[in-house]
Image (cartoon, rainbow, N blue to C red):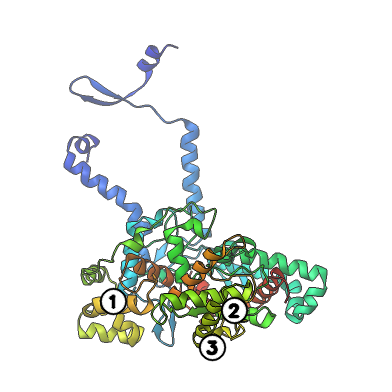
Amino acid sequence: MKHETIETHAGILIVLTLIVISIGGLVEILPLYFIDDTVEEVKVDGIESVRPYTPLELRGRDLYQREGCYTCHSQMIRPFRDEKLRYGHYSLAAESKYDHPFQWGSKRTGPDLARVGGKYSNEWHVQHLVNPRSTVKESIMPNYGWFLENPLQFNDIADRMRALKLVGVPYSETQAEYELNIKNFGKEVANQLDITQAEANLIEQAVSKNYDGYIAEITEMDAMVAYLQVLGTMVDFKQFDDGYFATFR
Amino acid sequence: MSKEKKSQTVQTTGHAWDGDIQEFNNPLPTWWIWGFYITVVFAIVYWFLYPAWPVGDSYTKGMGNTVEYTTKEGEVVVTHWTTRALYQKEMQAAREQQAVQLAKYSKLSFDEIKKDDAMRAYAISVAKVLFADNCAACHQPGGAGLISMYPSLVDDDWIWGSDYKQIETSIRSGRKGVMPSFSKTLNEKQIDDVAYYVLNYSSKQNDFARVKNGKEIFNTNCAACHTQKGIGNIQLGAANLTDKIWTVAGITAKMKDKDKINSIKQVIKNGIAREMPGWENRFSDLEIKMLTFYVNELGSKQ
């Protein structure tokens, strides 16, 4: 085909341009779906360690995205000693496998949050989100006071889970899917992944754990703190030999 | 050479648009072209030396790039170049570097560390860094705490005990400080009197009728945890009310008695539900030992 033919036919030009610019993505991304070791196998006694978020945690993740937390906080601990000393074990690909989109982030204005779960108490998170400088004097994080004021909106929680199910997150709707979840994650987790029970599960978790300290209402703070407290806690690294995860690269 | 003259010598691509619009064909500088060729050659060499091409369900591992490391369990692993293997090697090097010094600590008792100035200084310098990264978010840099929220670790009051064993338990398993709310059990007058009585422990008050009334209420409702003498109970994390250090109520020495009582009333009305998370899974045994030593050093010894 002559150069002039391409340049004078917009349709051909567009198609050929698309083919050329997609090569980079196809070569770098596509093979990862076929390579066995891309996502580590993280199982303890045949049960998957990494599970999808519960309905309440999922709403917390949505809020995390709504507020743009990822613009200042990464969720990706790199395999370096200094990172391990400050944040904990390096992040596994498996730990992000149910994140759509993943929250790795690309900039740390604030600290990495990949393993913030369990590091501080619920009350600390509530107080810190409302006014970060009340606990960390030198912090430049904005106040997120409305988390406590806004009631959590969750009547669409089932739809949110269905949307993620479409891209491969194993939330269950049918009995067969539910039973498969019991096999992979155990009964307790499988119950949380059941879309038909989503609303009841969300209320149950928010009321029983009462993350925000206010019994009267389920606020956005409940979801936010529930999400923060689960980050990086799913894999119990004491169950695995040192160096086990290095064998996947 | 003027611009005009130069342009006449440059070749065109040979296309003519709308009759007379032509495209110059300016060749790239030679050094740039060579730079490009060199990156191509670099990439090809890289393919052979490092993990590069996907092949089926695996990938080419590269040649002559082996990394050897020893795991914590003592297993020697030889593998192709990966960032995780380099990490293992980095961690191994640090372990070996610190092994001699740290081995001394696992044998020493707390008292022995304390007696030896060099050992004491080293333990504190290690723990200081751990404290800043992990504990300071609540207990504040230096362990000053936040009044009414996170206990100060530098004062003389220890809610959960100050000896090494008790501090270690606090760090390992965390603590849950719980006091029920009395806003439904007691009426306003009763809460007022009991707060008056609580303040009476540390600074004597004049209204004896109120003290007497408060004492009765205290002994029925509060003494189970705080004891009748008000000295608290470190098993339950019940604060000592007889000293002038307030661990929960936001009371400072300069406040008037009336404000102090109001602060105490707030605590009685709202109760307390505060929690320190357990750190067993984040720290190694030795790190916990050093932190325990450091925290004990922070406070004055009872």
Q: Which mark is residue A203?
A: 1
Asked if badges 3 and 2 are on one and the same chain, I answer yes
The CA span between labels 3 and 1 is 35 Å
The CA distance from mark 3 to mark 2 is 22 Å
Name the residue nearer the viewer: B81 or B256: B256
Image position, residue A51 (x, y; %): 36, 76
Q: Disc 2 is attached to a residue of which chain?
A: B
Asked which secondary structure carries label 1, the reply is helix
- For residue B131, above or below residue B277: above
Marked residue nearer the N-terminal end (3 or 2): 2
| Kind of residue at disc 3 | Ala
User: Badge 1: how crowded within 10 Å, few (<14), some, or many (20+)?
Assistant: some
Q: Residues within 10 Å of mark 3 (few under 14, many from 20)?
A: some
Query: Mark 3 or 2, which is nearer the eye?
Result: 3
Which residue is denoted by mark 2 in the rendering? B170
What is the chain letter for disc 1? A
Discs 3, 2 touching: Cβ within 8 Å = no
